Image (tube, grey):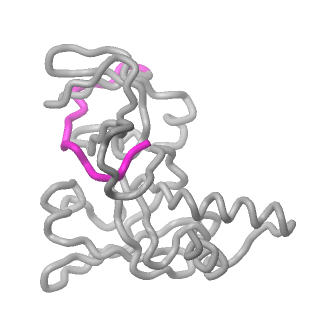
Amino acid sequence: MFTGLIREIATVKAQRGNRLTIDSKYTPKLGDSIAINGVCLTVVKVEQTTFDVELGSETREIIGAEKFQGRVHMEPAMQANDRFEGHIVQGHIDAIGVIKSITQNDNSVDIVIGISKEHIINIIPKGSVSIDGVSLTINDVFEDSFRLTIIPHTIKETLIGTYKVGDKINIETDLFARYISHILAHKNGKKNITWSDIERMHSLY
């Protein structure tokens, strides 16, 4: 489990088949879980200044190769005695979003991200979402997109300031919204429910 608070901007030094070599100040242990741009991966080799993680075949099919190149967000998995901050992030990517617009405000940046209608059901106004592993609060939800407001601290500490219109990003929707949506869909025999239904149920937790 992760929090969506980025530990470090690491660098993908090499990719060989299913393995990524990560150059990082952080030194994990063999078998540790590490989120790279929001994707939970397992450490399979540790050296003095680098470590290797392994990509599953399904991960490679879903996640674009560009998400595992150059500078990346890195977060180690939470330990049982860690202080809980951010929100609950599993490192399981639900969808690939596309940045539709970036608007500079006085002291923040508004980003609108397009997402499929299949997954917009789990995007909740004022709820949480993880984009490339960064935990953020959702401001507005539209038919097939949502708006985030990014504060200067987040821009400084993450790679979000480098994003451009058209960039693809990894999205993990809120864990509780996914659970509630799944339960209600099966209980009521409904294929889809509205995001207002999910918001109402989410407020109970």
Furthest residue toward bottom? 106
Q: Quadrant of residue 27?
A: top left
In which quadrant of the rendered image does the N terminus lie? top left
Q: Position of residue 149 (x, y in %)?
A: 29, 76
Furthest residue toward right? 189
Q: How many discs appear?
A: 0
Residue at (58% x, 64% y) in the render: 177
Residue 74 belongs to the span the image colors magenta: no
In which quadrant of the rendered image does the C terminus lie? bottom right
Furthest residue toward front? 81
- Between 20 and 165, the one lying in front of the other is 20
Position of residue 65 relative to residue 24, above or below, is below
Q: Is residue 5 left or right of residue 143?
A: left
Q: Position of residue 34 (x, y in %)?
A: 35, 34
Residue at (54% x, 52% y) in the render: 94
Q: Quadrant of residue 158?
A: bottom left
Residue at (86% x, 66% y) in the render: 189
Residue at (36% x, 19% y) in the render: 16
Q: Quadrant of residue 186?
A: bottom right
Q: Position of residue 115 (x, y in %)?
A: 51, 66
- Between 17 and 136, the one lying in front of the other is 136
Position of residue 23 relative to residue 192, above or below, is above
Q: Position of residue 204 (x, y in %)?
A: 59, 74
**Residues shaded magenta:** 1-17
Residue 15 belongs to the span the image colors magenta: yes
Position of residue 102 relative to residue 168, above or below, is below
Q: Is residue 129 left or right of residue 179?
A: left
